[in-house]
Amino acid sequence: MQEIVFTQGSLIGALMAQAGPVLFGTMLVLFGGALVISLLLKTSPKLFHLLVAFICILLCLWIGVISLDLAGASANATIGSLAQVSALLSIHRVLLVPIPFFLLLNALITLLVYGEKISDRHAQTYRHSVILSVWVSFILILLIGFESLI
Amino acid sequence: MFSFFKNRIHESIALSASLSAALTLQVGWICVLLIERSEHVRKWFTLSEKIGPVSGLYLKMLVLFILFFGVCVLVRRGKDCSHWRAGVQWFFVISLIMYFIFTLPVLSSFVIVAL
């Protein structure tokens, strides 16, 4: 059986080698769309289909990023003056991971229940909940990204 | 008959999602503090030696969410939930803030990933 070999310098090879950052970058791009759509739900209720699709993809990407992150966890010692801060932030980063997952899941279930009626007056609380979930998820994912840089 | 069910909004399901997410986050931060303080709890949560107690924490939080969601849907199915709406959403926001505060590195400084 012939092994798949990526040629040196190929785009797919580079993407496969850096799958985590690529998935994370894709998430940020999709979040850009989801943030705008969540704000437009009141005026354009038909956009909920698009938001549901975005949230489904975001959930899958988030599971992928976390799986890659945990699979790559190794006994690397952090050295230097920022060693303790880096260790603490990596713990905090790992503990923050469930929040975006549950927030996006909550937004997805709410959108699937209400559908186009999410723009109605009686669904105002749930519309706010969806907007809050999407925006807080985005902020936390940015925070997780920044914490992983230190 | 089917159009009747299609047009009906099952608010109890949306409410159950918010309530179960909030309860899961509340249980989550309590588990985080227990993992730090008790060796027995830490061992109980450690499903993978490589990843540490966070493996059990993630899995148990997911199972709890499904469990809470199922129970809430069964309890509130077909009932009027309008008077619970605001309360549950505020509980959801408070749970979010509490989970964020109680997982700050100042409060939880245990090693959960093999560093």
Image (spheres, coloured by chain):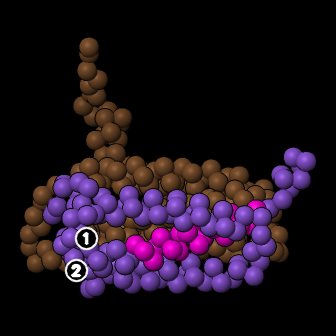
Quadrant assignment, res A5: top left
- At 24% across and 60% down in the image, what residue appears? B46
Amino acid at dot 2: Arg
The residue segment tinted magenta is B10-28
> Which residue was labeled with disc 1?
B41
Q: Nearer the viewer, residue A126 or A18?
A: A126
**Is disc 2 in contact with disc 1, using a CB cutoff of under 8 Å?**
yes
- At 34% across and 50% down in the image, what residue appears? A67
Q: Nearer the viewer, residue A92 or B70?
A: B70
Using the image, tell me which numbered label, if any, was put on residue B74. none
Quarter containing the C terminus of chain A? bottom left
- Is B31 magenta? The answer is no
Q: Where in the figure is residue A54, as x and y percent of width and height? A: 59, 53
Classify 10 Å Cα crowding around label 1: few (below 14), some (14-19), many (20 and above). Answer: some
Q: What is the number of callouts on the image?
A: 2
> Which residue was labeled with disc 2?
B37
- Is B27 magenta? The answer is yes
In this rendering, does residue A150 appear at all? no
Judged left or right of residue B77, residue A104 is: left
Quarter containing the N terminus of chain A? top left
Q: Where in the figure is residue A131, as x and y percent of width and height? A: 63, 71
Q: Chain of mark 2?
A: B
Quadrant assignment, res B32: bottom left
Find chain A in the image and tell me its colour. Answer: brown
Find chain B in the image and tell me its colour. Answer: purple
Q: Is B39 rendered above or below residue A10?
A: below
- At 27% across and 80% down in the image, what residue appears? B108
Judged left or right of residue B33, residue B99 is: right
